[in-house]
Image: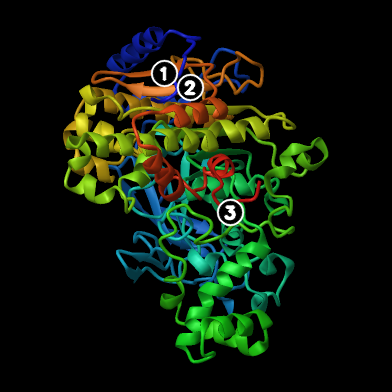
Amino acid sequence: MLVDERLHMHNSSNLFTRRYQTMSRNIATRLIHAALFAGLCTGLPAQAAQAPAEPSTQASTVSLVRHTAQGLVKGMLEEQGRTQAYLGIAYARAPIGELRWKAPVKPALHAEVLDATKVPARALQIQKGKPVGSDDCLYLNIWRPNTPDGNLPVMVFLHGGNNQTGASTAASYGKALAANANAIVVGLNYRLGPLGFVELGALKNGTAEENSGNFTLLDINAALDWVRENIVSFGGNPKNITLAGHSAGGRDVMAILTSPIFKGKFQKAMSFSGSQTMSSPEWAEAIHTRAFAKLAVEDGKAVDAESAAVWIKAGGEDVRQWLYGIDAKRLVRLMSGARIRMRVFPHLFADGKVLPSKGFAVYDSAADARSVSDVPLLLLADKTEFKFYCATDPLFKDWVADKSVMTDAYKHAQYAFASGYGSQFFGYANTQQSAERISRHTKSPIYVASFRWGTEPGIVGEEMAFVHGSKHGIHMDFVFSEKKFDLQKKYPNAYRNEGVTDLSRLVQAYIGNFLHNGTPNGRGLVKWHPWSSVKGGPTYMYLDADANKANARMTTYRMDPKKVFKAMDADPSVKPEDKAKLIAKVMDGRFFSAPLDRRYGNPAHIMP
C-alpha cells in the first residue's frame, strides 16, 4: 500500500469557495478574468492583495501591425476576439547548412509586412515512427489580450517532449491564458534531438558556447534576447519576464536557472513537472558516438560499429563534413523513444560554460549558489505522474488496451505498484527534491503545488482514475483552458462539470498573479505559502476539484524516501520476483529514478 499522506490544513477551502463562487456569479464573464488576474498582491506573500488598475474591457483600437527589429508583422484575433495572435515570427535564422550546429544567428530583415497568422512548422522530430516538421524551426508565437493595455508581464513557454518531440507554437498554447491572465504568452520552437543536443568531438570547432553541444539552450537564449528587444512593441514589459516550461521544458528551466549565460534575462520561473537533470559530457559522448556509428556504417565510412566509433572519436575534418552532410531526417531518428531515460538520449550537458560543470551541485554551497538565477520559482507536479508512462510501457500497454488491467486482480496489483510508488518518486523529483536543494542557499520564495484532479473515480470514472489518474501533463488542460488534450477525447464526460471549469479558473488565477508580481497570492484565493525548510512548516498547495467547484488547501506534507522504500519492500500485493522486475524494467533509469536506482542497484545515468 502507498504511504499515507498526512495533511495539515492551514486555511479553510470553504472560505475560498464562498468568495470565489460569489465573484464568479456577480462579475460579468469578461471582468471575471480582469478581476481575478489583475487583483494581485503587493509582492509580499503575507500581505493582503491590493488590486491594480483593471485591464481595459474596450475592444482594442490598436492596429494588429507591430514593429520588430526585423520589420513589421501583422497578426490576427483569436478567442472570439479576446486575444491578439502573432504567429511564426523568426527569432533566428534557419539552423541549416553550415548553421546546423552553430549558435543561432539573428534573423534577416524583411521589407514586406510579415503575415504572422500561420502556425509555423514544429522542429524536426519523430512522430508515429516518421519524421515530421522542419529543421527550419526557430520561430515563436506571441499572444496578448485584445486591449490597449501595455507594460504587461510576459511568460516565455518551453514545451515538453523529452527535448526530442513537441512544439510550443501550436495554436492551442497561449490564446486563452493571455486573455485570462492579462499577460503576454510567448511560445518557442527550438532544435530537438541530436540537432539540439549533440556531444561529439568533431563538432567542437566553434565558440565555447557552441562547443557545449547545448544548442537547444542556445536557441532559448536567443529567443529570450529577441523577446527582451522586441516585446515592448507588443505591449510587454521586458523587465517582467517569467520563463516557464512543462516536462522537458520544465527540466530546461531548472537547468537554465544554473546557467551563467541566462542570468538577468528573466525575473521569475515556473517548472511544471520538470526535475533537475543533467548529463556529464564524457558519458554523453560515448552514447552519442555509438548512435552516430550506425549511420557511419550505413554510409560506408566503416565496416562495423566498433570501427565507426573509433573513426568518429578521431574527430577529423572528414568526420565533421560527413556529419554536416547527413540528412536531418535521418538524424532525428537517432536515440528516439527515450521515454525519460538519459541512457537513451543524454542531453543538458554540464559543459562548464552554458551549464556548470558541477551540475545542480552548485546549490550545495553558498559560494557556488551565487552564480545561479535567484528568482521567485513556482514548481508543480501531478499526483500520479508516472501513470502517463506506465500506461504505454511495454509491460502494461496490452493490459491497458484490452482492459485486463481493470479485470485481472494480479495485473491490477502490478500496475498499482509501479504507477503508485513510481509516481511518489516522480512527484518528489519534480517538486520537493528541487525545493529543498535550491532553498538552502537562495533567498527568493519557492511555491510548490501538487495537482490532484483525476484520481477520484466518482468524478472521472473507475478506468480513468486507475489507469491515468492525475497523470504527467494533466495540468496542461487547466493551465491553457484547452479542449484538445488526449484524456478529454477519451473520457469526455469526466470533463463535463463545473468543477473542471472552476479549477481551470483557479489555476490560471494563481499563475496570473505569479506572472504579474512573483507571488501566486491574490484577492479571494487561499493563501499560498512559500516552501518552508522548517519541520512542520508549509510545503505543498494541493489543487483539486469535485464535480461542482475547485478547492485549494495548504499542507505540510513531505515525502520521506526511506519510508516509501520500506513500504515498497513490505508490500505483499506483488510477488518478490515480479516486484524486482517492475523495479528493474519499468521504474529504472527514469529522470526521477536516482534514489530507486541507488537502492536497488540499477545503473545510474543522471548527474547527482
Give the side of residue 282 with respect to residue 570, left or right. Answer: right
Dot 3 amino acid type = His
Label disc, if present, on residue 541 of the rendered structure: 2
In the rendered structure, are the residues bearing label 2 and label 3 in contact, judged by CB atoms less than 8 Å apart? no
Whole-number angstrom distance, CA of label 1 to CA of label 2: 7 Å
Label disc, if present, on residue 552 of the rendered structure: 1
* Residue 14: image location, x then y, percent: 37, 8
Q: Which mark lies nearer to you, 2 or 3?
A: 3
Dot 2 amino acid type = Met
Residue 279's quadrant in the figure? bottom right
From where the camera sits, is residue 206 visible?
yes
In the rendered structure, are the residues bearing label 1 and label 2 in contact, judged by CB atoms less than 8 Å apart? yes
Helix, strand or loop status at disc 1: strand
Q: Is residue 580 above or below residue 333?
A: above
Q: How many marks?
A: 3
Whole-number angstrom distance, CA of label 1 to CA of label 3: 36 Å
* Residue position for label 3: 605
